[in-house]
Amino acid sequence: MAGPILRHTAPDSLILWLATSDRASFSIRLFDGGHCLLDRPVADHEITRLRIGARAWVNLLAIEPDSALPRDTRLEYDLGLAGSTGQEDPQWIRDWASHLCPDGHQRPGFTLKSKLDRILHGSCRRPHHPASDGLVRVDEELRNAAHLEDVPSLLLMTGDQIYADDVAGPMLHAIHCVIHQLGLYQESLEGASLSHSRELTSMTNAYYHRDALLPESEFNEDLTERFFGGVRKPVFTTANAGNHLISFAEVMAMYLLVWSPEPWTMVTAAEPVNDSKELARYRQEQQAIDAFRESLYRAARALANVPVYMIFDDHDVTDDWNLSALWETTAYEHPFSRRIIGNALLGYLLCQGWGNQPENFGDLIDQCRHLLDAEKDQNELDKEIQDELIDQLFHFHCWHYSLPTSPRLVVLDTRTHRWRSEIRRSHPSGLMDWESLTDFQQEVMGEDAVVVVSPAPMFGVKLIEMIQRVFTFFGKPLLVDAENWMAHRGAANVLLNIFGHPRTPRHFVILSGDVHYSFAYDVRLRHKKNGPHIWQITSSGMKNEFPNSLLEWMDRLNRWLFAPWSPLNWFTKRRRMWISPRLPEGREAGERLWNHSGIGDVRLNDEGAPTAIRQLNAGGGGTIFQQRKED
């Protein structure tokens, strides 16, 4: 149904994720050129199967090679599928997913690089955005990588791999088709005007009106809130909540549909709306979804032919997820919103987080097995076990991870370790609390160079951060995306102190997404000649873009107000830093922001410093971010 997606790879481990419509048995083959390194059935202890419906299984294969896999050479793998008995001969990838095989090859392949010398990275893949898909450009880059130095070491997906809170009408229809065809497990619901997930398809106004189901809350904690009238608004603050995913089945169907072309064969042609305005919107979204579907086989091929690592951001769960202490209290204390968040996080676990470092999730996967293997009454999840699992997910604190690569890769969780505001509960929380920032410091201390993934940029566009600060001052952080590293004094100061520590790495490469435009900054500590070299490199989105005219206006105004020599910099928390924006080729003179969907491409030398920073457009072409001559 989906996959295989190539996940964590190492000389002693090969992780493959895939979804099947039957309880399959697997065989594995590995080749180094014409030499067969491995050819055997996948052992039972190497397979974890989780049944998510009457005709749907999620499988994680943790292959342990008989001997260490060689580095810096192309390896090919083949996966054989057979029925649950394993008696018949297996069918190989060329038989059941030939679109995953690169041109001129019989099997997918990858290269275990000895160094992180080329990294592809990106975020924000919104299927119904009219822009092209950045994963298609990844497929193009893999196809053109004729030499070892051109082969990507890995692909980093740095947040918003799905948009659980912003779903097109045709995508929601496709989700319901997949749920029906695969018999994905349903669930009981409480705290809303419906009591069961089956009612999501049969209720009046099933499309574009789910925001009416979402719980509301009175945000009037302080004088500022009362000044603005104590506005009632949904707990979920997304502006596009009309089709917000709710059930576990919907989340899992969404993942299948964004990872693979195969589930789309189950989708019927329909226009399940009657209102004329909604029908016009549905048809417009259908055009974008059709284009997304048309190139999806290439996205699936990309995910099968390069090691892929992922981390969540807010839209993988819901917009503004854990924005503030007040948001958390309101969302987690309501049973309906708590279940919606929990289902999205469970989907992230099974379809994204699990494959990064499977050994970190043993207890959670055991609890998932308890939920999914429990006896079902009409294909329905046990409410008590589901609530218990969701509670465990909310208290799980190991979503972050690191890899012992050269240089070391450290991927931060900026969503579940929040530093809550001590000034006012409605103010944005710090993206990481003191304890997690201390752990981060210990992780990188003593390294010569490090690549850090922070879903939100550590050093963003100052004008936009200033606007966020103004809205927060007036008690309205939810009206803008008020999340940035500098929005919380404590988190900002600790982060900047890490960069100033004498044992901090000499080279910091920070990879980010989130913002729907791309840029690159060179960052140094003021008045510290031997301080670290820091590069903030932001690539966003894979299939999303910022409103172009608005971005151009903000880019120009930011350039005038916050040039490196501007005295306004001394009124920011970053006054200890010298931040020099790089200029993208192909933009008008002086503009720093690049606004095209695509994928980021960073080349590193042996010391872990960037030699080239590019943004590759999804539809072809792109830009290189050039260091300014005066720097």
Image (cartoon, grey):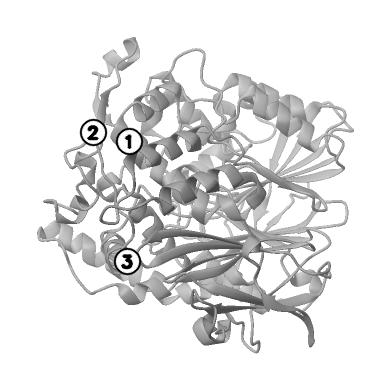
Q: Residues within 10 Å of mark 2 (few under 14, many from 20)?
A: some
- State the CA–CA distance, disc 3 to disc 1: 24 Å
Q: Amino acid at mark 2?
A: Gly
Element under disc 3 = helix
Contact check, label 3 and label 1, Cβ < 8 Å: no
Please identify the quarter of the rendering in which residue 389 is found. top left
Q: Which residue is mark 2?
A: 191
Where is residue 188? Give x, y as percent. 26, 44
Q: Name the residue: 17% across, 67% down.
A: 271
Query: Where the C terminus falls, by quadrant?
Result: top right
Q: Name the residue: 22% across, 60% down.
A: 281
Q: Is residue 612 left or right of residue 544?
A: right
Picture disc at residue 337 = 1
Q: Which residue is mark 3?
A: 178
- Compared with 400, 96 (above or below) is below
Q: Nearer the viewer, residue 425 or 443?
A: 443
